[in-house]
Amino acid sequence: MNKVAVVGYGNTKFSNEDKPIESLLVSATKSLFDQTKNIDKNDIDAVLVSTNDNAKYLSAILSELTGISPKISHTVENLCSSGTNSIVSAYSYLVAGLADIALVVGADRYDCHGQILEWDSARGEFKHPIFWASMFTKAHKREFGTTEEDLAVVSAKNHTNAKLNPHAYSDKTYSIDDVLQSKFVTDDLHLLDCSRPCSGASSVLLASENVAKKFEQPVWIKGIGQKTTSASLTKNESLTTMTSTKIAARQAFDMAKIQVNDVDVAELHDAFTICEIMALEDLGFAKKGEGVSYVRELYGTQDKKINPRGGLIGAGHPLGATGVAQVAEITQQLQNKAEKRQVKNVNVGLVHNMSAAATSSNVLLFQS
Amino acid sequence: MNMFENELKNGNFVVSECGNCKKIVWPPSDYCNCCLSFVTWRKIIPDGKLIEFSKKNEIIFGMVELEGKIRVMGRLKISSDEIRNGQCVKLDSCNYENGPQFTFVSCNGAY
């Protein structure tokens, strides 16, 4: 099978800026072109756009606005995991030999409607993600004795990491007490337990093995795992386990022939603080019920291994951009170009990106 | 609107069931998600189990399981002092206004 590498990336600052979606897409593409040597627009075979925006024909529009005439161009939407779904789609084109170089750009606006899945009747009037997150949180508290303070550690850690990310939405650090003092959104969630929708865009350039050599420090995609268990949140049999994440992780580790202990740096989908704890457990970084101690150890030792760019909580969550930004971060980390956020001695990186109360998950593994 | 939503408007919670597979189809759909036959509709058995709950301002909300299979998020008209995980709850009312709405009370009617 053809190998595929990430050979370039670009980002915009995540913010509340009221910018057209097309402009966000072009900004992240310009950032990629500015940072990537040896790129020729004529060599780009595929342009994929990851977004939940209602605007149409965005990949063709982005191609026109950036002077690219690709063979393949289309949008990919899969709620919060649209970014990694787009990257896997681009990977597939490259592996199949239909393209040699693919540009993937993810973007969404602060007013994106993608966070609410109107179709899911089972959510009743409680459609916003804070309601399923409250169910996950309360169930984890009940089953494992997880406390508000344990959850606050995740937020404090990720905001601290985001402070060193120039593209992050948040530029403030928060103590555990600050998180606990932030207003209650529900009885089980503080405001600072939640990621926030914002405007932002990220991009990555993928290349097949024979072409990747002309770029500096290609980072190889070694493993891919994807699983959709359902669309309705109420099909989750357990409220303390993300089944789709567990299944996707197993696939990715098997494909890469890598163990979780080999992972040096990871981007996890912390839509809410509880999600990082559950992801650590379901990906195998910690045993079930021990995600909390894992996070406390990271925070206590200022270890940036998990969510070095600040996660969704610190960096912000423009839905279509998130998965792409996660891959861009892992690429930077494995290229030793993450500056103040750099985790030392990294060789293997992991990205975990999920949708709609973890009914769908993608897990990707990378190696320098 | 589909059958489920139409019936909610009339205050009825109906379940889609496949005559061929003899299975409940949830979330509601016109077709069986196993054999893709047309479903039939019937009223739900209103007694269920409270799986989990939380509170936003003065509204207690939670996930309820009905007929051992159907899980929905709804309002819980049960006092904070009495509510407990795993307790028996009963569908009190349902409606459709900008989306489905479900309200549950304690099986013993305590409020």
Image (cartoon, coloured by chain):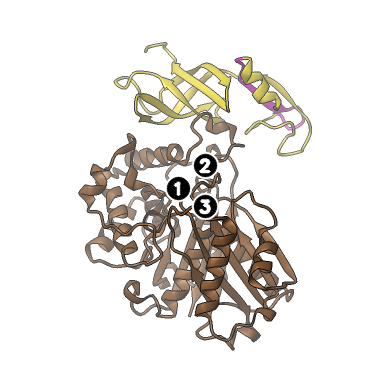
Chain colours: A brown, B yellow
- At label 3, counting other C-alpha atoms closer than 10 Å, the crowd grade (few under 14, some 14-19, many 20 or more) is many
A191 relative to A61, above or below: above
Q: From which residue to which does the magenta span run? A: B11-22
A338 relative to A239, above or below: below
**Pick the front one: A111 or A78:** A111
Amino acid at the residue labelled 3 = Arg
Amino acid at the residue labelled 2 = Asn
What secondary structure is marked by label 1? loop
Which of disc 3 and disc 1 is earlier in sequence? 3
Residue A241 numbered mark, or none: 1
Residue A109 numbered mark, or none: 3
What secondary structure is marked by label 2? loop
Proximity of marks 2 and 1: CB atoms separated by less than 8 Å: yes
> For the image shown, how many numbered marks are present on the structure?
3
Asked if residue A220 can be seen in this view, the reply is no
Q: Is residue B90 a member of the stretch shown in magenta?
A: no
User: Residues under labels 2 and 1: Cα distance?
Assistant: 8 Å
Amino acid at the residue labelled 1 = Thr
Q: Which residue is mark 2?
A: A236
- The residue that appears at 37% across and 64% down in the rendered structure is A306
Which of disc 1 and disc 2 is earlier in sequence? 2
User: Residues under labels 1 and 3: Cα distance?
Assistant: 30 Å
- The residue that appears at 43% across and 29% down in the rendered structure is B62
Q: Chain of mark 1?
A: A
Where residue A45 sits in the image (x, y, percent)? 70, 75
The residue mark sitting in front, 2 or 3, is 3
What secondary structure is marked by label 3? loop
**Pick the front one: A21 or A157:** A21
User: Residues under labels 2 and 3: Cα distance?
Assistant: 29 Å
Q: Is residue B15 a member of the stretch shown in magenta?
A: yes
The answer to whether residue A296 is left or right of residue A284 is left
